[in-house]
Amino acid sequence: MRQVSSRVGIIGLAAFLVIDVLLVVMALNSTRASVNGAALSPTVHTGGAQSTSGTGSTSPTATKTTSAPQPTVAVAPLAVGIAAVDQSTAIRFTVGSCAKAGSSVEVSTDGGSTWKTRPAPFDAVMRIRVRADKSTFAVGANQSSGCAPAIRQAPGLTKAWGDAVAATDVWFRDPQKPDTIGLAKGGTGTPCPGAKVIDLAVVDAGAGALCATGAVLVSTSGAQWNRAGMVPGALAVALDGKANPYAVLPGAGSCAGLAVVQPDSPGTVVGCVQVDLGSVRPGSVALSMSADSGWLRVGQRVFRADSSLATWKAA
C-alpha cells in the first residue's frame, strides 16, 4: 500500500508540473501575440503637425512658407525712349506709330526736374542721338512717306529739325518690322532670329540688341552678333562708353523694383530702382547712359544715377 501511495503521489506531482508548464507556455504566447499586433498596427497622426522619432518623442514637421510673388511686367518693344547727355541733360521721347502718330519729344537741362516740349520730327520716332556738340539727330518715319525710315537733324537740343533724308547708314529699330533693325553699314538686319527686337542701344563703338527671348547681343557693325548674356524678362538695354551692356530686369535678386544688371551675371544687382512693378506698363521702360550718369525712364517718371549705376533717385 505504501508503494501504491508513493506512486500515486509521484503521478500527481508530475501532472501538476505538466499543467504548470502548459500555463506558462500559454501566457508567453499571449504576450507575444500582443506585441506583434502592436507592431502591425499603423500609427495615426492627427492634423499632420507632428512626427514621431525613434525615441518616442514628437517634433514639429517643417512647414513650407512662400512669399507673395512679385507682379510681372510683360516684355514688349519699347514705346518710349530716353537719350542721356550728362547728369543734367537728357531727351526723352514717345515712339508713336506711322498709322496713328502720337510721338513726342521733351528736353530737360535740370536733371529731369522739368521737361520742355519740342516739336516731334516724325509720326513715329525710333531713335534720338545727341552728339558731343549738342547737335541732334532723330530716326523715324511718317505715314505720308509710306513709313519709310528717315533722318532729321538739328544743330542744337532745342533748334528746329532739318529736312528728312533716307535712313541708309544708321542704327534704328524698323517702325514696321519688329524683328528688323537698320545698320550703320547700310541695309537692315535681324539680330534676333524668330524674335522681336525689344530695344536697341547705340554708342560710337557699336550697338546692343535686346531680344524678346532675353538674349542680349552686341555688334560693332551688325554683320555679326555676339551674345553678351541671357536675361529672360529684361525690359530694356543700354551700353556704357566702353560698349559694356546693361539690362533692366524687374524683381531681380533682392530688388523689389527694377534692377539694373549686367547680362553675363543677371543675378547680381548693380542698382535697384524702387518702383511698384504693378504700375509698370509693357514697353514703358528705357535706359540710357552717358559718361557720368545713368537715366532710367519708367512711363513719365525719370530716375537718375551716377556712372556706377548703383544708387538711383527720382528726378
Image (tube, helix red, strand yellow):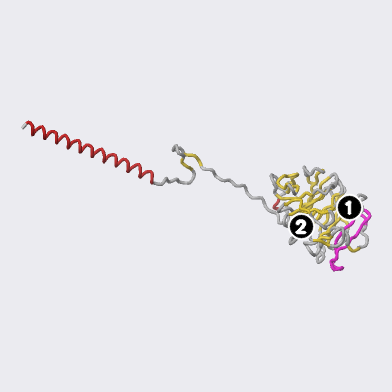
Comparing labels 1 and 2, the label whose residue is closer to the camera: 2
Q: Residue placed farthest to the top in the image? A: 2
Amino acid of disc 2: Ile
Magenta region: which residues? 136-159
Rendered location of residue 9, percent (x, y): 12, 33
Residue in the image at 51% along x and 43% along y: 61
Circle 1 packing at 10 Å, graded few (<14), some (14-19), many (20+), is many
Relative vertical location of residue 65 with respect to residue 151 in this rendering, above or below: above
For the N terminus, which image quadrant?
Answer: top left
Taking the image as shown, residue 68 lies to the left or right of residue 155, namely left
Q: Would you name the residue on which mark 2 appears?
A: 198
Q: Residue placed farthest to the front in the image? A: 3
Rendered location of residue 186, percent (x, y): 87, 61
Relative vertical location of residue 12 with respect to residue 146 in this rendering, above or below: above
The residue lying toward the viewer, choosing from 174 and 119, is 174
Give the SS element for disc 2.
Answer: strand
Rendered location of residue 81, percent (x, y): 81, 55
- For marks 1 and 2, the one nearer the N-term is 1
- Residue 224 on the magenta segment: no
Q: Would you name the residue on which mark 1 appears?
A: 130
Taking the image as shown, residue 201 lies to the left or right of residue 27, namely right
